[in-house]
Image: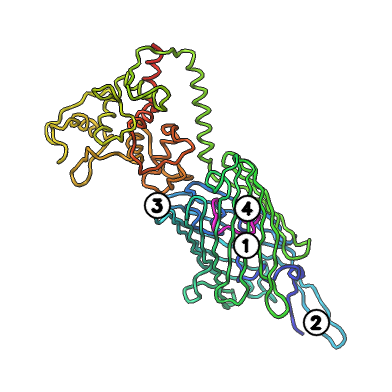
Amino acid sequence: MRQILIIFFILALFAHAFAINADLGEVGVGARPLSLGKAYVGMPTDASALFMNPAGLAYQSALKITTMTGKLLSDVTYISAAAAYPVAGGDLGIAYINASTTGIPLTTLTSTATQDIITQQGVTDYQSSVLYLSYAQEVIPKLMLGSNFKIFLQGFSQTSGVLNGASGNGYDMDLGALYQLRKELSLGAVVQNLLPTSLGGKFTWANGQTEGIPAVAKLGIAANILGDDGFYQYKNQVVKLALDSENAVKLSRPGLWHLGCEWGLNEYFTIRGGVDQMVKAVDGGWGVDNNLTAGIGLKYRGFSFDYAYHQYGDLTDNTTHYFSLGFVGVPEKVKQEIKKQKEEKDQKLLMPTIKIKTGIKSFTDVKEGFWAKDPIEYLATLGMIGGYPDNTFRPDQPLTRAELATLLVKAKGFEPKIPEANLFSDVPTSHWAAPYISVALDHKYISGYPNGTFMPWKEVTRAEAVVVLSKFAGLSEPVSLSENPFPDVFKRHWAARWIAVAKGYGLLEYLSGKNFEPDRDLTRAEAAEIISKTDYAKAKILELLKK
């Protein structure tokens, strides 16, 4: 007599469905990646990045959540959940995938000279789980690294008799990288289950037997064809293409390709499709299945719903449907639209009380139609900024550090104060701007350099000026960013958080739809425009126009 376990439904599954050498990250990665044929290594922009390429968690440093459910081949229930949150220096994540099935018959087979007799001994349930702990960080501008520590658990509800020792646990690690080559193109790489057995990367069964967890290397490229960050722009549509290659490390199985396309018809609705290659067993070795995938995505105010259709093999019964709910943060574009609507409403309420003011100060070089004419003339009339003795303003002239300090003090109406001693080695008490620099230092609007100099003659860049002017406006630096504040200012730029808060507050409206150019010198006209958008200046201007 000999005993065997016959699990009837496994005959309809791929051999890897429950084997530890293909962890649950093959399936439970979220509906969006599945609908894209799992071509996601180069474009991880939501919490699904945790499964596909953990480096992507740092791409949008904000709270991200996703959940997924689906029934693989009508027998195996998959659920997964992932969340990531920014912390000082990076992003932490946690995720869980579980696959389970119930009612597996346990049988014995008794062979006689005339027949085989199968006797059912009961039933058992099966579960397999993976817990992920993740961390990601941008190590240098545009390059992000991320890692997963994974704990594997699997087993049957009955662990005696024919299933003695049929449960166990193990652990391993993933390491990923993501590089934004340019705003339209990103590259990704990940090695999953990279630990060798000598360093603990293995699965140990209850009976003491161990087996390795084969490593898999993946490379991905993603391109933004249409959109604000794309090669081209067409209305508000977004088109993305992604291609991944996958190769098992130290296994003689075929290399695989994953291809995906995403078409956002508008900011709410997206259509997806792809091809997900998977290994299958054939006579004499390994073969490859080209599984078609498709799906849709709905998004509103940062919340998302995704559906994925995934074919498995040639049988129509093998088609599976997956559903995900998630949160990806409120896009900066939506925040700006909400703020714009509020400002327009406030302006409509104020308009009936505003009258055209006569006697507004003008300058010979600020002509009618100049883009910053109104803020320059209003602030000059209020005494918040000044021109030159020849009645020019020189709006396109770069602003120096001394002029910036003077402008800030005048804008707030503070009395200049002649310092009792030299403020810096290059700012003696006789310097024309010393009284203004002294007051600006007292109010911490501006500071000097560690070497004891102030460099009053140095022209101020846009990035430097926005940091100073944001503090002047009383704004607070945000803890983290959900996306790049401008196409040419990556969110890890030293001034990105101040630039983002200034943009969100409306100080940079004049750059709407343009690049920020952080290293470009700030002009006197730009300084007037930004200051005119602060609450303090707006209140003064409204008082002026009401008179």
What is the CA distance from the residue labelled 1 to the residue labelled 2? 46 Å
Q: Nearer the viewer, residue 442 or 204?
A: 442
Tell me whether circle 2 and circle 4 mark residues in contact (CB < 8 Å): no
Look at 52% across and 66% down and name the residue there.
191
Quadrant, the N terminus: bottom right
- Look at label 2 and name its amino acid: Thr
Helix, strand, or loop for circle 1?
A: strand
Instruction: Specify which label sits upstream in the sequence, 4 or 1.
Output: 4
Check disc 1 and give the amino acid type: His
Is 44 a magenta residue? yes
Q: Quadrant of the C terminus?
A: top left
Q: What residue would you read off at disc 4?
A: 32
Highlighted range, magenta: 30-46
On the image, numbered disc 1 is attached to which residue? 258
Where is 451 relative to 204, above or below? above
Does label 3 or label 2 sit earlier along the sequence?
Answer: 3
Secondary structure of the residue carrying numbered label 3:
loop
Q: Nearer the viewer, mark 3 or mark 4?
A: 4
Judge left or right: residue 190 versus residue 164.
left
Please state which of the two labelled residues, at mark 3 or mark 2, is closer to the viewer. 3
Measured as percent of width and height from the top left, residue 329 is found at 53, 43
- Residue 471 % position (x, y): 34, 35
Left or right of residue 29: residue 409: left
Q: Which residue is mark 3?
A: 89
Q: Tell me if label 3 and label 4 are in contact, CB under 8 Å.
A: no
Asked whether 85 or 145 is in front, the reply is: 145
User: Which of the two marks, 3 or 1, is nearer to us in this view?
Assistant: 1
How crowded pointer 2 is (Cα within 10 Å; few <14, some 14-19, many 20+) is rated as some
